[in-house]
């Protein structure tokens, strides 16, 4: 009992020596009115949490202010199609493709005619070199005739023995590199799918089945390939030069599976 009383008195003396001003929320009046063995609640965690809440509120208000200023200063990005880079690139591609497109004038139709003087033409052309040729079944013979400065138009005449033949004219706008008239023979890849030609006269306007569309963008059509009654009459015509280029006169026998055609033809220039 004596030891407990001594410990209690020692505790009271230590407590009395402490300064209550070091504890927040405790005043001197409270220390005078309350006994030493009963200290007021000094929970420091509440003070710390309150100060942190105040700091968070101040930081939040500052951040909101900065965001508001940032929204006002940041320039709006232009939408696609209204001046953006994507729209500009698409426009430049479209412009470049338009600039690359060939600018060629429209071609006038040719002047054509027929004559009953088939025997006279054949007799004349037999005496001329390379004027009588055989266009074999399934083949297309193309005569390349370049334009020349000394002339203004190209002219042609042709006839066949016994059967008709397809004929058409095209113009290649590629600049002329040679003034020689040349002949090219090509085979049709559609022979197996085509039926044998009908023998005898064929009405005008019968489209040539063996003809093929031109894939070259520089080649323009003057007269599509039609089957002509060149075994009954002479077929002739002319065409004024539209500019510099090469005429492609096609004699088409690709629709025939069995018949070779003997062709009498001549091509010449006129002023």
Image (spheres, helix red, strand yellow):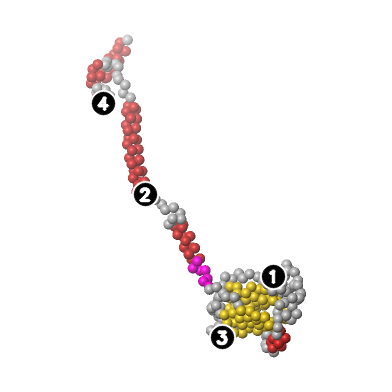
Residue 115 location in percent, x, y? Answer: 68, 83
Q: To which quarter of the image does residue 65 belong?
A: top left
In the image, is residue 152 part of the stretch drawn in magenta?
A: no
CB contact under 8 Å: marks 1 and 2 = no
Q: Residue at x 71, y 72 (%)?
A: 255
Q: Residue furthest bottom?
A: 127
Marks 2,3: beta carbons within 8 A:
no
Who comes first in sequence, dot 1 or dot 2? 2
| Alpha carbon distance from label 2 to label 4 | 51 Å
Classify residue 99 as left or right of residue 247.
Answer: left
Q: Which quarter of the image is occupied by the N terminus?
A: top left
Q: Which residue is mark 2?
A: 74
Q: Which residue is mark 3?
A: 271
Q: In whole angstroms, how far apart are the C-alphas of marks 3 and 1?
A: 35 Å
Task: Tell me which corner region of the image, top left, top right, bottom left or bottom right, holds residue 45.
Answer: top left
Neighbour tally class for label 1: few under 14, some 14-19, many 20 plus, Cα within 10 Å = some
Q: Position of residue 188 (x, y in %)?
A: 69, 72
Tell which tag, 1 or 2, sits nearer the viewer: 1
Q: Earlier in the sequence, mark 2 or mark 3?
A: 2
Q: Which residues are magenta?
A: 98-104
In the image, residue 67 sits, relative to residue 163, either above or below, namely: above
> Which is closer to the viewer, label 4 or label 3?
3
Image disc number at residue 209: 1
Question: Depth check: 172 or 35 in front?
Answer: 172
For marks 1 and 4 on the same chain, the one whose residue lies earlier in the sequence: 4
At mark 1, the secondary structure is loop
Element assignment for label 4: helix
Label 4: which residue?
22
């Amino acid at each position: 009992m004596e030891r407990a009383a001594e410990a209690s008195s020692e505790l009271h003396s230590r407590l009395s020596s402490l300064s209550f001003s070091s504890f927040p929320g405790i005043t001197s009046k409270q220390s005078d009115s309350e006994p030493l063995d009963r200290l007021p609640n000094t929970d420091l965690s509440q003070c710390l949490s309150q100060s942190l809440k105040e700091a968070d509120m101040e930081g939040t208000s500052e951040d909101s202010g900065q965001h508001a200023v940032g929204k006002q200063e940041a320039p709006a990005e232009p939408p696609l199609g209204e001046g953006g880079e994507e729209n500009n690139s698409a426009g430049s591609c479209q412009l470049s493709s338009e600039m690359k497109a060939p600018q060629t004038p429209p071609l006038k139709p040719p002047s054509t005619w027929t004559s009953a003087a088939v025997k006279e033409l054949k007799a004349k052309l037999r005496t001329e070199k390379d004027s009588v040729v055989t266009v074999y079944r399934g083949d297309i013979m193309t005569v390349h005739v370049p334009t020349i400065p000394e002339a203004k138009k190209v002219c042609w005449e042709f006839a066949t023995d016994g059967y008709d033949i397809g004929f058409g004219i095209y113009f290649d706008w590629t600049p002329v590199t040679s003034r020689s008239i040349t002949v090219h023979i090509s085979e049709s890849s559609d022979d197996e799918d085509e039926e044998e030609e009908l023998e005898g006269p064929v009405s005008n306007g019968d489209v040539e089945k063996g003809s093929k569309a031109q894939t070259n963008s520089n080649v323009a059509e003057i007269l599509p390939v039609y089957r002509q009654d060149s075994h009954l009459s002479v077929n002739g015509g002319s065409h004024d030069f539209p500019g510099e280029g090469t005429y492609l006169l096609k004699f088409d026998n690709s629709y025939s599976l069995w018949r070779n055609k003997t062709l009498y033809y001549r091509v010449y220039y006129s002023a």
